[in-house]
Image (cartoon, helix red, strand yellow):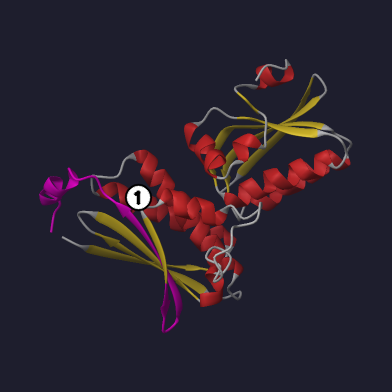
């Protein structure tokens, strides 16, 4: 069964920790993601929110939509398109020595995809759950 | 969310122990502390990451900035880290080849990696 959890935070540095804490807690509710992978997800959420903040005006909000499914956890982060430019440059050149964000995002999640939306852009981060978690899904209350 | 920063001197090293979460919110404090150490004339800086619970690319940027700054004064900045989750971030970004990483403060100030 798929569950959707939505979170909106002010686009300010002090709220990034809240976003990664919430996503980390959600990732641990259903089996299939080891602690190490939840840590990886927390890092990637932090990278994505930081990237969004750098490209957003003060007073804006970042919307996170988490789709918690038996086989995967998807975190979709919405922001103006320019917000993710540093993490996903349009011309696919190699990141310079100081741009570690893109390396971490690409290495730590199973899939990272930037989509254009009516409101700007949506960065979709996917963590696949272990196969064994399919059976455990029945234990969750509806 | 608080960041703990504590500086001690040992065998001509300035040992900066970092505790807590290093991200876009707390990184400015960390950056300021490293700049202050270099400005005070410290040329051998050891950043102890054993108390760090979270580190993202913002924190990595601070470490690299600190290294560049101290090297421009012919100094060096090394790390103490045994935590798998932090080492993983350093490995992915290629920084294990850039920093000398020690298992403990004692190993560093005694010169053993």
Find residue A2 and report its horizontal and vertical position in percent: 20, 62
- Outermost residue on the bottom side: it is A118
Q: Is B97 left, or right, of B37 in this rendering?
A: left
Residue A83 colored in magenta in the image: no
Q: Quadrant of the N terminus of chain A?
A: bottom left
Badge 1 element: helix
Q: From the image, tell me which residue sits under label 1.
A: A25
Chain of the residue that carries numbered disc 1 in the rendered image:
A
Q: Is B42 left, or right, of B110 in this rendering?
A: right
What residue sits 32% from the left and 60% below the top? A74
Residue A135 colored in magenta in the image: yes
What residue sits 52% from the left and 65% below the top? A88
Q: Is residue A60 above or below residue A51?
A: below
Q: Quadrant of the C terminus of chain A?
A: bottom left
Q: Residues within 10 Å of mark 1 (few under 14, many from 20)?
A: few
For the residue pair A7 and A48, the one nearer the viewer reads as A48
What residue sits 70% from the left and 34% below the top? B6
Residue B70: image quadrant is: top right
Q: Let me know if residue B18 appears in the view.
A: no
Q: Let me know if residue B110 appears in the view.
A: yes
Q: Is B108 left, or right, of A82 in this rendering?
A: right
The span shown in magenta is A115-142
How many numbered marks does the figure carry? 1
What residue sits 70% from the left and 45% below the top? B64
Find residue B30 and report its horizontal and vertical position in percent: 69, 45
Find residue B48 and report its horizontal and vertical position in percent: 65, 31
Find residue B41 and report its horizontal and vertical position in percent: 89, 36
């Amino acid at each position: 069964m798929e569950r959707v959890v939505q979170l909106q935070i002010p686009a300010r540095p002090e709220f990034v920790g809240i976003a990664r804490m919430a996503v980390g807690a959600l990732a641990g509710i259903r089996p299939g993601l080891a602690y190490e992978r939840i840590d990886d997800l927390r890092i990637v959420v932090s990278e994505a929110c930081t990237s969004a903040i750098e490209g957003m005006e003060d007073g804006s909000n970042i919307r996170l939509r988490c789709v918690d499914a038996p086989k995967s956890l998807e975190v979709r982060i919405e922001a103006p398109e320019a917000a993710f430019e540093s993490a996903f440059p349009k011309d696919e050149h190699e990141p310079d020595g100081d741009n570690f964000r893109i390396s971490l995002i690409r290495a730590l999640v199973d899939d990272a995809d930037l989509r254009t939306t009516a409101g700007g852009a949506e960065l979709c981060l996917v963590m696949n759950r272990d196969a064994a978690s399919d059976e455990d899904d029945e234990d969750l209350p509806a | 969310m608080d960041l703990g920063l504590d500086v001690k001197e040992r065998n001509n090293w300035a040992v900066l122990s970092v505790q807590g979460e290093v991200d876009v919110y707390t990184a400015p404090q960390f950056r300021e502390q490293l700049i202050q150490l270099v400005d005070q004339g410290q040329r051998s800086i050891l950043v102890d990451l054993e108390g760090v619970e979270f580190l993202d690319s913002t924190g990595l940027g601070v470490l690299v900035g600190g290294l560049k700054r101290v090297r421009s004064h012919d100094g060096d900045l090394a790390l103490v880290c045994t935590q798998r989750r932090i080492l993983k971030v350093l490995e992915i970004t290629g920084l294990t080849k850039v920093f000398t990483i020690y298992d403990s403060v004692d190993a560093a100030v005694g010169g053993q990696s």
